Image: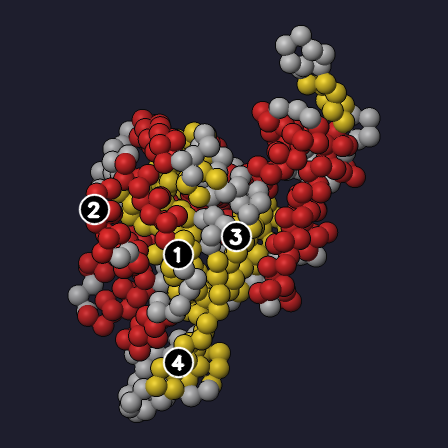
Amino acid sequence: MSNQKIVVGLDIGTTKICAIVGRSSEYGKVDILGIGKVPSNGGVTRGVVSNIDRTVAAISEAVKMAEEVANVNIKNVQVGIAGAHINSLQHRGMLIRNDSEKEICQSDLDKLEADMYKLAVKPGDKILHVIPQNYMVDDEPGIIDPIGMSGVKLEGNFHIITGQITAAKNIYKCVEKTGLKVTDLTLEPLASALSVLSPEEMEAGIVLVDIGGGTTDVAIFHENVIRHTAIIPYGGNIITEDIKEGCNVMKSHAEALKTKFGSALASEAADNEIITIPGLKGRDSKEISVKNLSKIIQARLQEILELVYFEVKSSGLEKKLAGGMVLTGGGSMLKHITHLASLVTGLDARVGYPNEHLAKGMVDEVKSPIYATGIGLVMKGLNDAILTENLIKEDDSEVTEVKIKDKKRSFGFNIDIFKKWLTDDDLEDFKKIK
């Protein structure tokens, strides 16, 4: 085990904080060595850290559990970032080259991409990630890789993801306070995509919908490139709140009703099926109709799926999604949810499970959609480790340049980039945190 790269994915979610320890198998899949999962206990709200102390305590407990199961000492973690503060936009950049005879090289693409980080965004936001879509050379569109071509005017279309700098800094604070180091930050829907989508689906065109506790994350892929991302500020927790108010029960009972008896389609629920809930001390038990419960769930879930469909239409790719939709996350475990998703969006839908990429180890424990993000973070870390290893072994400077760029274009964003966002005062605070 000591000779193999071990990666820890840390999913800091609204309802749970989960640490997953994994390594690459000899066949390129993931061996799960350990897992630790604890409730967030109110430390995270809609994907954003809202209470430092509670989040730190939960991270420490989850990591300790994972360490004991995997029998390893965890020092570095791959962390996800999400929340309603995440936004995306499309932008085109242009570079005029001095020598039309000289071939376009990697440094030209680097310069074009670096210019995107200079775009003005709203106060408090920073550009988290710049993802190339395609290029134009002397007004010739639709070029995926222009390296080696000749031309004067080089243009590029980019998908730009922005987020609040304070949200990222708070994640770093929480992780650093537990004595751990953040290896990389990755946008959570992109991590989930790694674990539940196939290359064929990404090429054909597909919508990933990750229904978490506080948010629903949307990522749209086409021709193996991510084209659109969005975070919808509603998730499984708001469905629980609806049940709590609609059925006049305690929150713990509402959550149990949703997970054990809930259905995304009221028409599939029996008319005469009744659930009995124990009453409070000295009070009679309460009877809940499964039909009414399903109506409450369907109403809210339909609203979420309509917002997802709005994002699909906004992307302009509605007619190019041959792969349909993949639902994952805890909210995707509701019965008949794929049927409802197809009715609302008109797209074929399936539930995405991460077990396709797992080789052995604790497969049965983590094959649920609720672990899609955590396993995706592990896969992201292992992919980066392979790129880094190849980079060290490769002596050819030209090949090295390309591999550095490949790593830069991976789903996460580099810590060096994160530090560039910070002012001198911020850096002083960051050093104090460490």
**Position above or below: 183 against 413:** above
Whether residue 308 is visible to the viewer of this picture, yes or no, is: yes
- Numbered circles on residues, count: 4
Quadrant of the rendered image containing residue 220: bottom right
**Colour mode?**
secondary structure
Whether residue 367 is visible to the viewer of this picture, yes or no, is: no
- Identity of the amino acid at label 1? Gly
Give the SS element for disc 3: strand
Q: Which residue is mark 4?
A: 94
Residue 414: where, in percent of width, then height?
A: 30, 56
- The label nearer to you, 3 versus 2, is 2
| Distance (Cα) linking label 3 and label 2 | 31 Å
Q: Which residue is mark 1?
A: 124
| Distance (Cα) linking label 3 and label 4 | 29 Å
Q: Which mark is residue 431?
A: 2
- Between 267 and 167, the residue placed more toward the observer is 167
Q: Report crowding for label 3: few under 14, some 14 to 19, many 20 or more residues within 10 A (C-alpha).
A: many
- Identity of the amino acid at label 2? Lys
